Image (cartoon, grey):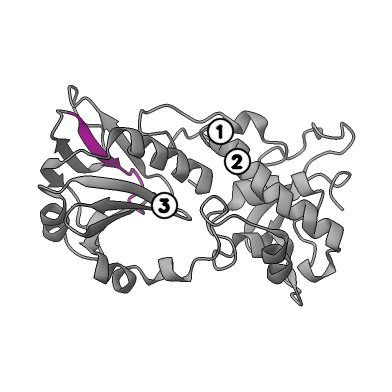
Amino acid sequence: MPELPEVETVRRGLERSLVGRRFDEVAVGRDRVARRTSRQELRDGLTGARVVEANRRGKYLLLELDTDAVVMVHLRMSGQVIIDDGASEAPRHSHVTALLDDGSRFLFVDPRTFGEVVVAPRSRIDVLIPEIGRLGRDPLVDGVDMKAVTEMCRNRRRRVKSLLLDQSHIAGIGNIYADEICHSAGIRPDRPAETLSSRSRRRLTDAIVDVIEQAVELGGSTLADSQYVGVDGQPGTFQERHRVYARTGQRCVSCGRGVIRRILIDQRGSHFCPVCQR
């Protein structure tokens, strides 16, 4: 958390409010936020640069600069990117603070400090962040079709949820959306992928697209800790549509008969309805 829908919501907010803006004054608070390079390189790479494009790959934000450099922002567990008017004191745990040329302010806030910000020439991004090159298809950028899902499942005894969480197959899906996708497809998350019929794979394909698109439309999911918000500080509302995630012991809102169960898959809590999902 955040996952693809939350990061895409942030990307769209940055596209509206950051593209075209120049970083005028930059302060970097903690070494950990710039651990792949250095605080100095982060300051130098941002200062005076203008954002020309806001992109995303899986859970990685990729901001193109007019200096032929790229800013990678990874929110990890609790990171936030905020654009505000700079009139008030920056929130606690603001590890990158930048004044922009229109008087607004860019903030990278991260209470748990797992997130990071990297600025590097385009030619060095693949070296500094090799995991980006190992990402699979992005549901919004590349699309996900029946062929891709069939290839993911073919001859694999791994459980369906394990494959959905494997970023080398489909990039951006995490624990929340893997549970919701499996429920929408009517598939138990612990079912071996190789046992899925063609019809089940079609349902899974449709569910990946539908759940991700619905979640983006509603600004992603903001859970009880309220750590994820968009660039305007507003929470998402897709959590109000969750049908299984974190609903252990509650009646299934889809069938009205099943009671949501929780099991562990790859050491992650996984939620499903034993009536809807077979």
- Disc 3, SS: strand
Q: Image quarter for residue 150? A: bottom right
Tell me the crowding category of disc 3: few under 14, some 14 to 19, or many 20 or more residues within 10 angstroms, Cα based. Answer: many
**Disc 2 marks which residue?**
213
Instruction: Tell me what residue is drawn at x 60 percent, y 41 percent.
Output: 213
- Residue wearing tag 3: 56
Q: Residue at x 45, y 38 (%)?
A: 9
Circles 2 and 1: CB atoms closer than 8 Å: yes
112 sits left or right of 248 in the view: left
Q: Closer to the camera, 64 or 106? A: 64
User: From which residue to which does the magenta span run?
Assistant: 104-114
On the image, the x and y values in percent for residue 165 come to 60, 60
Is residue 118 in view? no
Q: Amino acid at mark 1?
A: Glu
Q: Residues within 10 Å of mark 2 (few under 14, many from 20)?
A: some
Residue 194: percent from left, percent from top? 80, 71
Q: Is residue 198 above or below residue 155?
A: above
Left or right of 57 on screen, residue 155: right
Query: Could you tell me residue 260's position as x and y percent?
Result: 78, 41
- Residue at image mark 1: 217
**Gap in Å between the C-alphas at discs 1 and 3?**
16 Å
**105 part of magenta stretch:** yes
Q: Earlier in the sequence, mark 2 or mark 3?
A: 3
Q: Which of marks 3 and 1 precedes in the sequence? A: 3
Q: Amino acid at mark 2?
A: Glu
Q: Outermost residue, top direction? A: 87
- Residue 35 has which mark? none
Q: CA distance from mark 2 to mark 1?
A: 6 Å
Instruction: Say above or below: 27 vs 238.
Output: below
